Image (cartoon, rainbow, N blue to C red):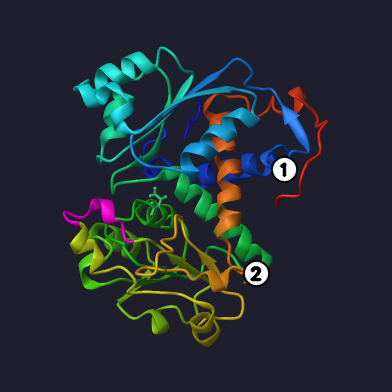
Amino acid sequence: MNFVGSHILSVDQFVRADIERVFTVADMMRPYALRQKVTRVLEGAILGNMFFEPSTRTRVSFGCAWNLLGGEVRETTGIKASALAKGESFYDTARVLSGYSDLIVMRHEKSGSVAEFAAASRVPVINGGDGANEHPSQALLDLYTISRELADHGKTVDGMTIALVGDLRYGRAVHSLCKLLAAYQGIHFSLISPEALKLPDAYVELLRNHGHQVFESDALPTGIQQADIVYVTRTQEERFDTLEEAQRYKGIFRLNQAIYTEFCEPNTVIMHPLPRDSRADANELDNDLNDNPNLAIFRQTDNGVLIRMALFALILEVSDQVEASSRAVNWYTAKRF
Ligand code: ASP
């Protein structure tokens, strides 16, 4: 794909070579994310970080990624603080905001909203999550993490076994990840969810049509056996008609150290797009896993910065200028990775 000036709306846009290209540029960004070096390659550029739905990681890490490349960030958070709450259309909002920014990241609760916004935007738009539909940058950072974690154990994405656990119906991170993984080969998918929250048929068919094996169940202990990766998700309570309905599914699957020790392989990697719901009625990923070296959730969030820097650099065509505008940092830097 031609990244330059493109919107990133869906992982459908990426073939395997494109994914690898993003990962190569992400690797190059590590010294900047680690604060070993500073680059000013986007000095003078402005990011419009438009989040009309709650976000912590995605919003802040997109902003940090842009800052680390030397640019400035302007943002809005929550629909109530924007003119969309006064009835303004996506078209008008996009025409206005794209006059202020060099690139826009947008999140909104409605599926397809970011594409609608992008169609009217005068600058590239990245989908920061549109309803239950897609979350492309999350899927890229997840796949980047999977490939790096597996490589540490001498394994590859091709041929791996991955267990996807929880709300597979509404979880947009899982939807985008499945589409990306379809481009790889010979993957065993273990889909663990309550019947009502199964992965939509279209994704299951996509995976099977690409030659992957898919097993569906509602039993955590058997489903996670032999998995190289266990990817746990949160019940997406904001997508249900009522909170009471969502409540029925909370806490059904809980992974903790005892279950991990009994059923997982010694080096099974534990992932979650976060936030993990740590309230007592859910507690899907127990705090007693925090010292487990295979818990990769904070490596995922760190990797999110690298992937988002890579997307910016590729879309704005500066990936080969980053080094030229770099220098060493001159302040105390804590060890992060
Ligand atoms: N942070 C992810 C998302 O925005 C996952 C989640 O919210 O459960 O989709």
**Residue name at image x 45 percent, y 26 percent:** 75
Decide which of tag 2 and tag 1 comes sooner along the chain.
Answer: 1
User: Does the numbered disc 2 mark a residue whose Cβ is under 8 Å from ligand 1?
Assistant: no
Identify the element where label 1 is drawn.
Answer: loop
Q: CA distance from mark 2 to mark 1?
A: 20 Å
Instruction: Measuring from the top left, give residue 52's x and y in whole percent.
Output: 33, 34
Instruction: Measuring from the top left, give residue 99's x and y in whole percent.
Output: 40, 12
Q: Is residue 120 visible?
A: no
**Residue name at image x 30 percent, y 56 percent:** 236
Identify the element where label 2 is drawn.
Answer: loop
Is 217 placed above or below 296 here?
below
Instruction: Measuring from the top left, give residue 30's x and y in whole percent.
Output: 69, 43
Q: Is residue 193 magenta?
A: no
Within 10 Å of disc 2 (Cα), the crowding (few <14, some 14-19, many 20+) is few
Report the span colored magenta. Answer: 235-242
What's under tag 1, amino acid-wise? Answer: Leu
Within 10 Å of disc 1 (Cα), the crowding (few <14, some 14-19, many 20+) is some
Magenta stretch, main secondary structure class: loop
Left or right of residue 335, residue 207 in this image = left
Badge number at residue 85: none
Q: Is residue 316 visible?
A: yes
Is 116 placed above or below 146 here?
above
Nearest to the observer: residue 52 or residue 32? 52
Q: Is residue 236 magenta?
A: yes
**Residue name at image x 25 percent, y 25 percent:** 84
Nearest to the observer: residue 265 or residue 59? 59
User: Does the numbered disc 1 mark a residue whose Cβ is under 8 Å from ligand 1?
Assistant: no
Is 10 placed above or below 121 here?
below
Disc 2 target residue:
293
Disc 1 target residue:
34
* Residues tagged 2 and 1 counted as in contact (Cβ below 8 A): no
Left or right of residue 254, residue 260 in this image = right
